Image (cartoon, helix red, strand yellow):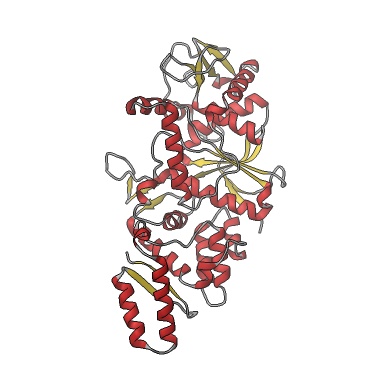
């Protein structure tokens, strides 16, 4: 089957037809780097990593350009830097490094390009200049604002009424604004705030213009796929569309818009006040990255997900079942198995893809299962976090080999003695159907 993706813009599932099959182009909104990323932030990172991997399989690794930005200029960053008494550069570099380390543990491939907002100020200024020249933006009191009424079909993505849009945008009342829905493209900076020279005075960009500028620079005026969380549909993605379309005069900014659903924790909205605010960094102290990744993919990306300890335990058990054979453990990343790929080609139907993985979990298909798991970003490392630093792997492997030899010689007493010795070391062993033995730290 051909790749079909649900398009938020049209509210339909569509056949994917890239503008240029030799260069399939995708943009996904990345993190604002001022704190540890939470598990909700991990959902689009994992979801669009799977899509990136699928596109690479379908069109070739050298024919897919995936751009995921880093927002390193933002008022939240400014406030956190002041709070910590550090420079903005120090804060953003540290936080970006934390983000990269955390998502690498989730099996996420680096994007083709990872642009930073601060490196694209010139493109933002140029884009704002185009909007002013075309009558879609105006300068006022050191600010530049997008003139929302100038775009007759503004709101196509979110399909909200004017009242809903006003409420959703948390509109600031300001005397320099012509209309209540007009949003900031450029704003002035005082001496203590980061700023850049511009035709409108020293200042800094608004949030929405950043992604329009970076996608334009690296993907062009129109590209194939734009992704992100459902919370970004309005106002962020709506405003990105307005800026880019009005600057360049095209019917669309991206042909397909994809959005993942919300995440809650144990049936409740995640919040610091409820004590259920989970960062990727903290979860990785208790759970292997493979387990976090698998647990995220057990729910279809467009559906809300309830993140629970029970679900994580089930995900760990299922992955252990898949990897508890030599073929899966030792396989290299290869082609995604046909039936698994077909499930993913149906709007990233990961629950169906996982069902197809179960179908492969039988004698004679271990290598295909292993290659597919590795191609989907799983490593097979299911050791309890922290435990791997307290075990001599060479010694454990030697004991496992000695036990296998004892079993072949039908020396059951020696086999049991070695098993007990391994158990006293905190090692759990599993005898596999193919005659091999696998091991892991006890949980």
Q: Name the residue located 38 percent from the left edge and 60 percent from the top edge.
A: 388
Q: Residue 192 falls in which quadrant of the image?
A: top left
Q: Is residue 207 visible?
A: yes
Residue positioned most to the bottom: 410
Vertical placement of residue 350 versus 8, above or below: below
Quarter of the view holding residue 346: bottom right
Up-down relation of residue 208 to residue 437 (above or below) = above
Which residue occupies the foreground of this view, 288 or 336? 288
Tell me which corner region of the image, top left, top right, bottom left or bottom right, holds residue 295.
Answer: bottom left
Q: Residue at x 61, y 23 (%)?
A: 127
Q: Quadrant of the N terminus?
A: bottom right
User: Left or right: 159 with respect to 283?
Assistant: right
Q: Residue furthest left?
A: 274
**Between residues 19 and 63, which one lies in front from this camera angle?**
63
Q: Is residue 239 visible?
A: no
In this picture, is 301 found above or below 195? below
Relative placement, left or right, of 443 versus 69 is left
Residue 283 x %, y %: 36, 50
- The reply, left or right, for residue 419 in relation to residue 88 is left
Q: Residue at x 69, y 44 (%)?
A: 23
- Tell me the residue at 58%/17% (across/down): 137
Residue 70 image offset from top left, x and y in percent = 51, 35
Q: Position of residue 278 (x, y in %)?
A: 34, 46
Q: Looking at the rendering, in which quadrant would you find the C terminus?
A: bottom left
């Amino acid at each position: 089957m051909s790749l079909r993706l649900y398009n938020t813009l049209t509210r339909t599932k569509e056949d994917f037809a890239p503008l240029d099959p030799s260069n399939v182009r995708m943009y996904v909104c990345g993190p604002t780097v001022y704190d540890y990323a939470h598990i909700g932030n991990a959902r689009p990172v994992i979801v669009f990593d799977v899509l990136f991997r699928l596109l690479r399989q379908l069109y070739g690794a050298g024919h897919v350009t995936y751009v995921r930005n880093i927002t390193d200029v933002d008022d939240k960053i400014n406030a956190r830097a002041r709070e910590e008494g550090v420079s903005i550069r120090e804060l953003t570099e540290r936080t970006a490094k934390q983000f990269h380390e955390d998502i690498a543990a989730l099996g996420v491939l680096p994007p083709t390009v990872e642009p930073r907002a601060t490196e694209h100020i010139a493109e933002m200024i140029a884009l704002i200049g185009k909007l002013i020249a075309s009558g879609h933006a105006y300068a006022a009191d050191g600010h530049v604002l997008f003139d929302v009424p100038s775009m007759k079909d503004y709101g196509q993505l979110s399909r909200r009424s004017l009242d809903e849009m006003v409420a959703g945008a948390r509109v600031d009342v300001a005397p320099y604004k012509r209309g209540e829905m007009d949003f900031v493209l450029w704003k002035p900076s005082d001496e203590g705030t980061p700023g850049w020279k511009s035709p409108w005075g020293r200042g800094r960009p608004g949030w929405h213009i950043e992604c329009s500028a970076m996608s334009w620079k690296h993907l062009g005026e129109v590209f194939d796929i734009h992704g992100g969380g459902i919370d970004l549909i309005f106002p962020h993605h709506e405003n990105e569309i307005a800026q880019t379309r009005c600057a360049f005069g095209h019917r669309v900014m991206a042909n397909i818009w994809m959005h993942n659903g919300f995440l809650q924790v144990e049936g409740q909205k995640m919040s610091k006040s409820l004590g259920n605010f989970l960062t990727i960094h903290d979860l990785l102290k208790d759970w292997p990255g493979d387990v976090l990744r698998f647990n995220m993919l057990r729910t279809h990306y467009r559906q809300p997900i309830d993140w629970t300890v029970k679900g994580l335990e089930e995900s760990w058990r299922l992955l252990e079942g898949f990897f508890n054979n030599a073929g899966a453990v030792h396989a290299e990343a290869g082609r995604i198995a046909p039936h698994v790929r077909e499930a993913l080609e149906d709007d990233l139907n990961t629950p169906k893809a996982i069902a197809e993985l179960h179908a492969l979990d039988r004698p004679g298909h271990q290598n295909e299962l292993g290659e597919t798991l590795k191609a989907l970003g799983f490593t097979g490392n299911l050791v309890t976090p922290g435990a791997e630093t307290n075990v001599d792997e060479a010694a454990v492997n030697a004991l496992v080999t000695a036990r296998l030899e004892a079993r072949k010689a039908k020396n059951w007493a020696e086999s049991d003695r070695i098993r007990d010795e391994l158990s006293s070391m905190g090692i759990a062993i599993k005898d596999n159907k193919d005659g091999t033995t696998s091991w892991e730290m006890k949980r």
